[in-house]
Structures are given as C-alpha cells and as structure tokens.
Image (cartoon, rainbow, N blue to C red):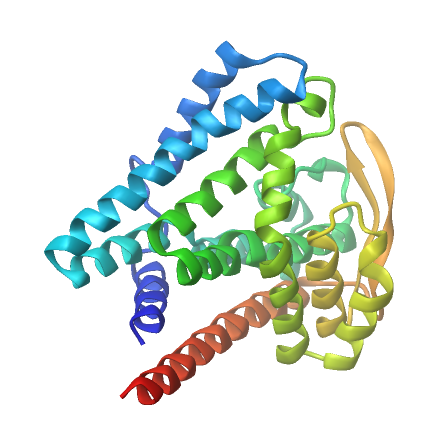
Amino acid sequence: MTTALMLIAAVVMDAVFGEMRRAHPLVLFGRMAVFLETRLWRNRRWAGVVAWVLTVVPLVLLAWWIEQLLGGISAWLSVGFTVVLTWVAIGLRSLGEHARPVASALAKGDLETAREAVGRIVGRNAAVLDADQVAVAATESVLENGNDAVFGALFWAALLGAPGVVLYRLANTLDAMWGHHNARYGYFGWAAARADDALNFIPARLVALTYALCGRFEGAWHAWRTQARHWVSPNAGPVMAAGAGALGVELGGRAPYQGQWIERPQLGAGEAPNAYTIDRAMRLVRRGVVAWLVVALVVGVVTGVSHA
C-alpha cells in the first residue's frame, strides 16, 4: 500500500506543480556529465563505461544513503524523499504541455507554428515536415516519451525506491546525451545506450501491453507482434508499434535526420495521424498511468490483507 500511495502522490504532485522550472536536478546533472565527458572522452568503449559509472553510481549510492538515513528517523520521511524524487523524474504534465501546442496549431491550419512546436520535442528537421509528418512526429514523441518520461520512472520507483528512480532517470538522461550513433559517441556512448536499453527492457513491454489494453487491443497486439522487431530501437519498437495499433493510425515512414530523409519501417495501420491523434495519444498515456496506479493500489490492498 505504501508503494501505491507513493506513486499516486508523485503523479498528483506532477499534475499540480508540473516540472521544476528553476535549478532542476537534471540540468545540474547534465552539466556534471558534460564536465566529465570533456575530461574522460576517448573514442573507446571502456572510456564510456568509466564515464557512465563515475557519473551515475555515486548519485545512486547517495540516494540510497539518504533513503536509509531518513528511514532510520521515520519511514514516512523515507517515503516522502522517494515521492519527491519520483515527481522530479516523471514528466506527464510536461509531455502534455509540449504536445498540446502542436495539436492546437495543426487544428488551426498553422503549419509554421506547428513545425516550431514539434521541433522542440523531436530530433528530426521539423522545418521541412508537412502537416501529416508533423502529426506523426508529435504522436511518436508522445508514445515513446510516455515510456521514457513517465512509466519507466514509475516502474523503477516502485521496484527499488529512491535509488531505482535515480538510476533510471540518470541513465535515460545520459542515453539522450551520449547514446548516439555518430563519430563522437559511437564507442564512447555505447555504455549509456546499452544501460538505457537494459533498464527499459521490462518497462517498455509493460507499456506496450498497457497501450494495447487501454486502446484497440487487436490492432496493438498485431503491430507489436509483427512490426516492432523491425524498428531500430529494441524498446521503442514495441512501445510505438503497440501505441500506433492502439490508436488505429500509421506511424513511421520517411523522416528527415541530419539533412537526409530516412525511410523507417511502418508501425500500426490505418489513417495518417492528425491534430486529433496527438490528443488521443496523450489520453492513451494518461489512461495508462491511471491503470498502473489502480493496479498498484489493488496489489497493495491484497498484500496488506494477506499479511493481516
């Protein structure tokens, strides 16, 4: 029951307060990561492993130590500490705040504003996207970040408490910074990419199942089973394929990256996404979060009754 209440409290705090606007811990962490990268970078995998360990492990141990220290004073202080860390780690409200301007601009037929808005949340060259491609980009971002920015953090907070949520969020952040397939990070970023893949393996598949159960199950299951394996990311594939199937739309296709148009595999089937699809994707994520919280609460009640 304590775990369920902890997750509920973190989600409520996110809904009420949103993302921290000043002195966000992840911004400070990013600066530390840049500092270590400039001193440890070598075009070798071992250098990336050393940098990842020195960047992540001390902070995970610090979170564990503080959790234990507070727990020795009061169990509720320890829970409160984990709640705050989980609130900082998740971004459900922020996800909606970034997706809504894209959907609103598309609904008004304002393509330039929609391009500017989607350019803030995706890595592709938004300036050359047409309206359908803008909707595809925003929908994909909502579905994938539902896993990365919400469900993954909730999973590790529930499983390992404060050190778990810190480990997940820092690993995810380093993957975004270092986990690129290019000349600088192809070797150095290997550890960051593999660590993020490992930590997301179970959450991503739970999220795919969540999208299926909260949307069109048959379409989601078919897309997950037949299309996900063709996607370049082993975790984004199931999440986005199931999400596309659950929404009954087709994602993937051509997208511009670093000046080149890349042909990506098809995910899902049906109509092309539009402004309404982006809103539907956000509702799918929110329904999934509610479902997770209900399941956590039920498990907590059953566990408490069985131990009574």
Looking at the rendered image, the quarter that the C terminus falls into is: bottom left
Would residue 74 appear left or right of 233 to someone viewing this image?
A: left
**Would you say 235 lies left or right of 169 here?**
right
| Visible residue check, residue 24 | no
User: Which quarter of the rendered picture does the N terminus lie within?
Assistant: bottom left
What is the quadrant of residue 26 in the picture? Answer: top left
Front residue (pair 40, 249): 40
Query: How many badges with numbers are in the image?
Result: 0
Residue closer to the observer: 21 or 79? 79
Reply above or below: 56 against 11. above
Residue 93 lies, with reference to residue 174, above or below; the image says below
The x and y percentages for residue 68 are: 23, 50
The image position of residue 123, as x and y in percent, is 66, 37
In percent of width and height, residue 171 lies at 51, 39
Of 4 and 68, the residue lying toward us: 68
Residue 147 seen in the current view = yes
Q: From the viewer's perspective, is residue 202 above or below residue 234? A: below
In percent of the image, x 30 and y 72: which residue is there? 5
Q: Residue at x 67, y 16 (%)?
A: 44
